[in-house]
Image (spheres, helix red, strand yellow):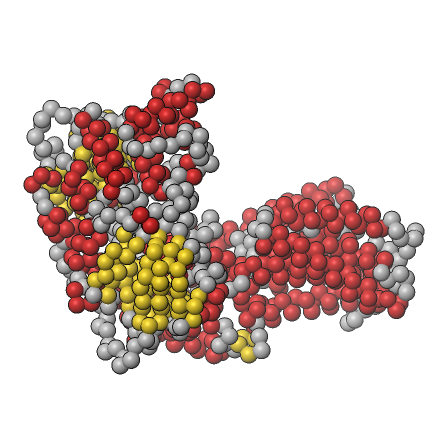
């Protein structure tokens, strides 16, 4: 194989191109919104988008880590809900118990992740089905747990007040999301743990050959993702004060959509925390715009679904594949033809 | 160039390939090859690994599409490449890897192998299968209800032949049918093949074991580097004559010269009585600064030996020490920690993270060296990799170039570069130049030699005798799972290696399943799909 490698500039473009569409889409969304639904870009609406986008973003970042190992996590709604309800249950409306409640919620998220991780990484079960089943179990436990609450019980007052404050005009939830994004960018780019994790995602077989602990990485990723979902659940609890059992149903498809539109490779190894976070804002902004336009809820679902499909069509693997095909065809057309004429042997 | 125009002695030609060529990527697997097999004839096809035998069989059986050339089976042209069509026209093939459905019992495998009009009523298939097994006379006593996956390797190989015979073909292709067979079983197989011949079947017998071939074949065709080297009458040709044809003229290949070895060498890798899936027991040592080659035809336990030494599949028995430390070989991590580094043959699936860059792929085993309290020292990492890229002449536009965009040779260099950063005690290189362009080969040989000169012990498995004789200090020949011969450095040349491979000594009983039960064939690449 003596095919010439493409130039540095071309590769850099190819590598970056998978993360481009989400930023383009974000720009298009802002332009469209400013023309048709200027209300979307108003102060209160933007502030709402910042909070909701950050919530989606945090869960999407957890999902992104899982997808980087070529897995998928469908236990997000269950984990988010149980974290939110633990804030109510453990918090017991007492401001002294806020930290205890938070710790419990995060531990619950990690525990659910551990179960997922052991079943998927250790027992090599199918991620889709395992996480769906675990999510179902959690949902069952949640609805049982919620019956033990007094009616109209809410999270501790001090906590819900804190989430309602504004730091530089935006909710603390947004800043938590931004911090988590920054943390992941640093971890993936600048630490050896992040590097090994990326390698395991890109090729688990080869990672095993070079001596990286593949199973451990696969288990840990579900735990870290579980903690992220729990953080989102805690924030949701603060925002809604008395969360119900169906509070997180939007977090089944939403995070996956954000990861995909953010350009991650579904076969593992490649994803960008920043573009995933941006994709979460794109989806939230789109939702907000549709609401401002007065679209019926049914129609909102249709548009949302179509956008996800469209996002998959233009992002990530497909772009890389198209570019690759381009190179391969060029190489083939360059290969010198076999000029030899075969002498037909006559019997 | 060949003895075309055979006398028309009335026997019909059952398989005829005319002017067949096929190219895979840059590799020309077959170049204008013509081959025919008459009814009532055993026509053997011999050649080294990679000489084009498998491609030829693939084309004849309809699995591989030729770039040009015609195929006629029993006089009828095969216009499109379709295994089903080839079978309908009267061709059957016994595959080396086995094509039986492991979960299904023997009787069902037979049943589905037979063409629909020759199948018995479904509920009578057990009796039918038992009768067929008797008819084929392969000394194959199987319960028709045993799942095919439970057969021993030898039984599987014979079963594969039986399954091909179920279709009552006009032409039978046998792809290396004796790699797992002992002398008695080879005899049974030959008896069956000769019986088929006397019934007017044409048999194409592909093998690298010349004594067996000379015993049974009528004509022998030799392939080398995708070209037909001539067809010989088995009665009037000899083994040395064939070896000469198989090897061909020596052509120039450059190899780095071994710099004078250290005054004191130490035994780094000591393997004692190691036994694993489909190989063993093997015992050998590799000293520091030494490159030891592993030769042998495909399917004689080499990949399994490498998988076991690198900790990918646990051994059944035996002792391995690396630099004085005993290895349990239960995990790759332990082996890597002890200083054993595997450079796998299948770069794409087992060695490299294709979507990640050159730098990431290169330093993955030496991250500790490039990090400080968990944070990567990116500048020193870049510098080291940049130096290596220069030293090994890795052609890449940038250090972040995804390795899947590199050529095969450069990919292999990235894989080899790991051993420069980690400096392991033992390097296991499996087919280090497979799919590597000629230009890069020398760079890889030089890199491996550099590692040896700086004290590593290298074990190199290659199917290319020229490579083995040029690169290695001595060569171990594997056959049927054991080391059958050691060729010392002063005797090393291509002919000597090929002779050792084709001599095909008798099978040691130990190489077969010791329990008499069967182990499903060890997958060489775990989880690659």
- Residue drawn at point x = 85 percent, y = 58 percent: A88
Image side of residue B118 versus residue A163, left or right: left
Is residue B292 in sight in this rendering?
yes
- Residue drawn at point x = 56 percent, y = 57 percent: A69
Q: Is residue A5 or residue A24 the one in the foreground?
A: A5
Position in image of residue B331 (x %, y %): 48, 61
Residue B7 picture quarter = top left
- Vertical relation: A292 (above or below) B181: below
Is residue A327 in sight in this rendering?
no
Residue B204 picture quarter = top left
Image side of residue B106 versus residue A195, left or right: left
- Residue drawn at point x = 28 percent, y = 57 percent: B483
Q: Is residue A311 or residue A238 the one in the foreground?
A: A238
Most extreme residue toward the bottom is B263
Image side of residue B147 versus residue B14, left or right: right
Q: Is residue B406 or residue B460 the one in the foreground?
A: B460
- Vertical relation: A264 (above or below) B112: below
Most extreme residue toward the right is A151
Position in image of residue B453 (x %, y %): 30, 76
Image quarter in which the N terminus of chain B is found: top left
- Residue drawn at point x = 24 percent, y = 68 percent: B473
Q: Count the marks: how many? A: 0
Position in image of residue A312 (x %, y %): 58, 49
Position in image of residue B176 (x %, y %): 27, 42
Q: Is residue B129 or residue A260 the one in the foreground?
A: B129
Residue B70 picture quarter = top left
């Amino acid at each position: 194989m003596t095919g010439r490698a493409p130039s540095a500039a071309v590769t850099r473009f190819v590598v970056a191109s998978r993360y481009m569409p989400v930023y383009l889409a974000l720009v298009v969304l802002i332009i469209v919104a400013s023309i048709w639904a200027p209300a979307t870009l108003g102060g209160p609406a933007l502030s709402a988008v910042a909070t909701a986008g950050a919530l989606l973003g945090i869960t999407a970042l957890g999902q992104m880590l899982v997808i980087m190992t070529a897995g998928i996590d469908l236990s997000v709604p269950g984990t988010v809900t149980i974290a939110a309800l633990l804030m109510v249950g453990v918090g017991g409306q007492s401001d002294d118990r806020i930290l205890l409640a938070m710790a419990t919620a995060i531990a619950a998220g990690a525990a659910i992740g551990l179960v997922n991780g052991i079943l998927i990484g250790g027992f090599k079960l199918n991620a889709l089905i395992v996480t769906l089943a675990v999510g179902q179990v959690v949902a069952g436990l949640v609805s049982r747990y919620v019956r033990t609450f007094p009616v109209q019980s809410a999270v501790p007052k001090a906590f819900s007040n804190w989430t309602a404050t504004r730091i530089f005009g935006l909710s603390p939830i947004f800043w938590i999301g931004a911090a988590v994004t920054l943390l992941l960018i640093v971890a993936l780019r600048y630490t050896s743990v992040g590097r090994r994790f990326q390698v395991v995602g890109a090729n688990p077989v080869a990672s095993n050959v070079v001596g990286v602990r593949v199973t451990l990485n696969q288990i840990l990723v579900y735990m870290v993702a579980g903690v992220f979902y729990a953080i989102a659940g805690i924030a949701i609890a603060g925002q809604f004060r008395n969360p119900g059992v169906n509070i997180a149903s939007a977090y089944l498809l939403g995070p996956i959509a954000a990861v995909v539109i953010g350009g991650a490779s579904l076969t593992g190894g490649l994803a960008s925390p920043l573009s995933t976070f941006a994709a979460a804002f794109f989806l939230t902004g789109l939702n907000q715009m549709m609401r401002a336009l007065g679209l019926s809820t049914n129609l909102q679902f249709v548009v949302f679904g179509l956008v996800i499909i469209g996002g998959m069509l233009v992002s990530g693997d497909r772009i890389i594949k198209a570019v690759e095909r381009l190179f391969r065809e060029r190489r083939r057309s360059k290969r010198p033809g076999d000029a030899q004429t075969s002498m037909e042997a006559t019997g | 160039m060949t003895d075309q125009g055979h006398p028309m002695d009335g026997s019909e030609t059952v398989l005829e390939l005319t002017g067949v060529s096929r190219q895979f990527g840059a590799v020309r697997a077959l170049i204008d090859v013509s081959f025919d097999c008459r009814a009532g004839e055993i026509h053997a096809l011999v050649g080294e690994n990679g000489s084009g035998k498998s491609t030829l069989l693939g084309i004849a059986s309809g699995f591989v599409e030729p770039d040009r050339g015609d195929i006629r089976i029993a006089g009828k042209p095969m216009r499109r490449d379709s295994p089903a069509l080839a079978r309908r026209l009267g061709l059957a093939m016994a595959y080396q890897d086995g094509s039986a459905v492991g979960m299904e019992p023997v009787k069902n495998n037979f049943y589905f192998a037979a063409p629909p009009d020759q199948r018995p009523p479904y509920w009578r298939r057990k009796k039918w299968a038992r009768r067929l097994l008797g008819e084929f006379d392969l000394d194959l006593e199987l319960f028709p209800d045993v799942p095919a996956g439970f057969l021993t390797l030898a039984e599987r190989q014979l079963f594969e032949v039986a399954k091909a015979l179920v279709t009552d073909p006009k032409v039978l292709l046998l792809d290396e049918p004796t790699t797992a067979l002992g002398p008695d079983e080879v005899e049974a197989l030959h008896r069956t093949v000769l019986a088929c011949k006397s019934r007017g079947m044409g048999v194409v017998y592909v093998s690298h074991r010349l004594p067996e071939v000379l015993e049974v074949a009528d004509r022998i065709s030799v392939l080398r580097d995708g070209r037909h080297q001539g067809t010989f009458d088995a009665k009037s040709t000899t083994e040395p004559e064939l070896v000469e044809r198989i090897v061909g003229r020596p052509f120039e290949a450059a190899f780095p010269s071994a710099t004078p070895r250290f005054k004191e060498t130490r035994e780094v890798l000591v393997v004692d009585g190691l036994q694993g899936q489909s190989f063993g027991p093997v015992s050998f040592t590799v000293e520091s600064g030494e490159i030891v080659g592993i030769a042998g035809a495909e399917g004689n336990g080499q990949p399994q030996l490498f998988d076991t030494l690198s900790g990918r599949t646990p051994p059944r028995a035996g002792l391995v020490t690396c630099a004085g430390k005993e290895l349990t070989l239960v995990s790759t991590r332990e082996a890597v920690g002890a200083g054993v580094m595997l450079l796998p043959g299948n770069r794409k699936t087992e060695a490299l993270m294709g979507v990640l860059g050159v730098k990431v792929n290169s330093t993955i085993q030496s991250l500790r060296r490039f990090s400080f309290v968990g944070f990567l020292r990116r500048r020193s990492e870049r510098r080291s990799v940049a130096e290596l890229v220069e030293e090994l002449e890795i052609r890449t536009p940038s250090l972040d170039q995804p390795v899947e965009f590199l050529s095969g040779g450069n990919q292999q260099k990235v894989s080899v570069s790991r051993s420069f950063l980690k400096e392991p005690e033992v390097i296991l290189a499996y087919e280090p130049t497979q799919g590597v362009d000629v230009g890069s080969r020398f760079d890889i040989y030089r890199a491996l030699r550099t590692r040896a000169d700086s004290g590593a012990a290298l074990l190199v498995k290659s199917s290319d005798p020229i490579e083995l004789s040029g690169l290695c200090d001595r060569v171990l020949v594997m056959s049927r799972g054991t080391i059958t011969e050691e060729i010392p450095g002063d005797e090393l040349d291509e002919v000597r290696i090929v002779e050792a491979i084709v001599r095909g000594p008798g099978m040691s009983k130990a190489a077969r399943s010791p329990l008499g039960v069967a182990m499903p064939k060890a997958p060489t690449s775990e989880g690659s799909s």
